[in-house]
Image (cartoon, coloured by chain):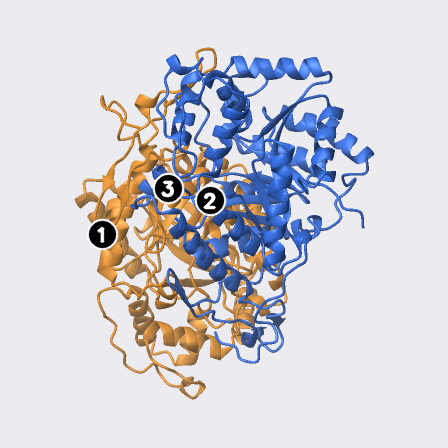
Chain colours: A blue, B orange
Amino acid sequence: MTRKLHLNAFLMGVGHHEAAWRHPRTEPARLTDVRHYQELARIAERGTLDSVFLADGLALQGHVAHNALGGLEPLTLLAALAAVTDHVGLIATVSTTYNEPFHVARKFASLDHISGGRAGWNIVTSAGEAEARNFGLERPAHAARYARAEEFLDVVLKLWDSWEDDAVVRDRVAGRYADTGKIHAIEHEGEHFAVRGPLNASRPPQGHPLLVQAGSSEDGKDFAARYAEAVFTAQQTFEEGREFYADLKRRVAARGRRPEEVLVLPGISPIIGSTEREALLLEKELEELIVPAYGLAQLGQLTGIELTEDDLDRELPDVPVETEGAQSRRKLVVDLARRERLTVRRLLARLAGGRGHRVVAGTPEQIADQIQEWFEGGAADGFNVMPPILPHGLSDFVDHVVPELRARGLFRHAYEGRTLRENYGLPRPASRYANDLVAAG
Amino acid sequence: MTRKLHLNAFLMGVGHHEAAWRHPRTEPARLTDVRHYQELARIAERGTLDSVFLADGLALQGHVAHNALGGLEPLTLLAALAAVTDHVGLIATVSTTYNEPFHVARKFASLDHISGGRAGWNIVTSAGEAEARNFGLERPAHAARYARAEEFLDVVLKLWDSWEDDAVVRDRVAGRYADTGKIHAIEHEGEHFAVRGPLNASRPPQGHPLLVQAGSSEDGKDFAARYAEAVFTAQQTFEEGREFYADLKRRVAARGRRPEEVLVLPGISPIIGSTEREALLLEKELEELIVPAYGLAQLGQLTGIELTEDDLDRELPDVPVETEGAQSRRKLVVDLARRERLTVRRLLARLAGGRGHRVVAGTPEQIADQIQEWFEGGAADGFNVMPPILPHGLSDFVDHVVPELRARGLFRHAYEGRTLRENYGLPRPASRYANDLVAAG
């Protein structure tokens, strides 16, 4: 089978551009309107995209005075999107630092049942201090977060396996609902968690809902190599993209896994016009709507430097780019500023579109060219598509870029499978307890 | 305005009777099929019922060898039901013992936004040992659970208030999205929780999603008197129902609240036939499908006595009915057995229908008589309706009992309001921070 592109629609409020809510083609009142997201999910499905993808954080982060923040919780929202779609995958970001594995295993199992096998979990470890403060904690160290995440995953996977696929018998005549020999207490006793199990939900249709990971630090890449089936990453240049791709696939192989079973999906924010000029005009329009105070606050949070409007026309001051090996996004931003010798104002404009993700403005053909170059050149297995304004940026992508990618033989014309896992071309894991002779529970 | 009945559809798998899954009119494979619950929610809405109500537990409890256990997580499921309904309320049970207030506040705020103001939270404190074992804990003491629950509620209410109603400004021209003077850090520092806030979701449409409570212990009733707006309770006899009703309303008044702002809703499992004979036949059919091993295990868990099939035709042995003032359901069951001098077999049959809730078999008129007697006689403001088999038990109730209640002037012909709170006739709370002169965040 020819290798095919995978494309997610990364949904975010009324668009990924930080000034999207001010643009005349968006309706910021729809931020908490489920019909807005249902419309987006249907557009994604019309374009046979693999999934809709939702980021998340556990605090009101960013300067809400100047941006449309405070939306809906992803898992709740995705259940409402499952109800109005049939094929598109549903990927939610959930933190391992401020949750319990029993809840997370159960919620994704439920979403997988509700959607008929379309659930995916984007695993994050929540770096921010603001999040810690909503859970009575100090900001946990990077290594501690990843140690907890590994054990968290271990527990969740055991819970998803705790009902074997054929545990439910439903023999009405004999009064036998389940074969309890196929439902297993997991009896996990670890450093962070003690969980007896079994899960109180039967095995998810996908066996395991799909595992996605988005950290690009060293710990993040190792974690991805061990657990992830798709990796979402921010890469500014083709060279960096290739390097990340090769590095990650090497790590996957070193873990004894097949490199093609972990998809690398960089973010891309496509600013689409029917002509290049039209695309650049839209980019300029959005740029002019930027509120500098917003970007300065964001940049200050990322780099640790307090910046004011007086700094806008200077270059970014020197900052340390490595703290504990954790700040991969900080490094990306500082590298970008230095490489292109950007003033703070220009840097803010570059970050406003995708918060460090690559922004590409052009015609559908030009955007397809970029996607094809990365896909065929060893920098990507597909992309997390981040439309600058929503819904129009997504419908433009689906109606104009997708047909171009199909015409080039790069992208599907129809969904291949029934589940997210099938559409990603990934196998369905068996329960680790299947064929065990001893069972509990 | 005349006082009106309130009716919730308490949904549970393919029916509340423990043998429902064996009955020829149910389809137990639909236990994890969202379309089953969507059909039920639409039936409830056709009958202008106030809400659909979902119980929950955080462990696989009960003998899954003989009953259809292991369904969907309530909040995820209700979001999927919100998507296919317009009026019916959506009440989910969530524990304060094994959750964090930030998550719970946020998920209910999201469900309230998604449903346009139809969310309700049934607050439980999770008594069971099996649940504790899934969260690395010993079973917490009754009083400790309620102390945590009070502080948990305090935090959740503050978070729901943390965005004032008019905090979002959306001034696109000026680039001003929100008035941060109206978004408040809550700075909670208590014995169990430290939560800075604000919530990362704007104020829920209802202000506060509706608060429901289901514990009937002394601590439970005090908690209800302080926080609840609806109380779900198990009452076997009219006299007990009146006593509970009067006691609860007294406690509410003693807290300085208006008694009519806390609705008392006993459970009722109506076994409906077009003739009394037909109803009794259905009851008998279900009784004959009971697997005694299942009921014995349940009863053993409740009373603490190990019972075997040899005990079936004896009366229940003596057991202590008060432990720490907590076991209100145990007392109800033992009282029932003693009052009617039931053998264990008869007791199991009585419990199989509603786990201690009242079961009433009869014609629609007879069931309406019972509802009317309790409603007019000071024992109930309405009922949590627990159909023995689903969906038929619910559609029979909606199509035959509801018209009878309407004809008697007891129940609405159309929804009065847009939100659950409006249909329950309850006021919308203002944010505690409104009109504060000092704001943070």
Residue B129 in percent (x, y) is at: 35, 67
Q: Is residue A330 above or below residue A347?
A: below
Q: Cα distance, mark 2 to mark 3?
A: 15 Å
Q: How many marks?
A: 3
Quadrant assignment for the N terminus of chain B: top left
Return the mark for residue B143: none
Q: Residue B222: which disc?
A: 1
Q: Are marks 2 and 3 in contact (CB under 8 Å)?
A: no
Residue found 59% across the figure and 51% down from its top: A114
Instruction: Give the residue at the far bottom of this rendering.
Output: B310
Measured in 3D between alpha carbons, the distance from the residue under mark 1 to the one under mark 2, in whole angstroms, is: 25 Å
Circles 3 and 1: CB distance less than 8 Å?
no
Give whichever of A38, A294 is nearer the camera: A294
Report whether residue A206 is seen.
yes
Q: Which residue is mark 3?
A: B105
Whole-percent x and y of residue A30?
52, 26
Q: Quadrant of residue A238?
A: top right
Residue position for label 2: B90
Residue A63 shows in the view:
no
As drawn, A166 above or below B151: below
Name the image quarter holding the C terminus of chain B.
top left
Q: Is residue A406 left or right of residue A387?
A: right
Looking at the rendering, which quadrant does residue B258 occupy? top left
**Circle 2 sits in a helix, a strand or a loop, which is it?**
strand
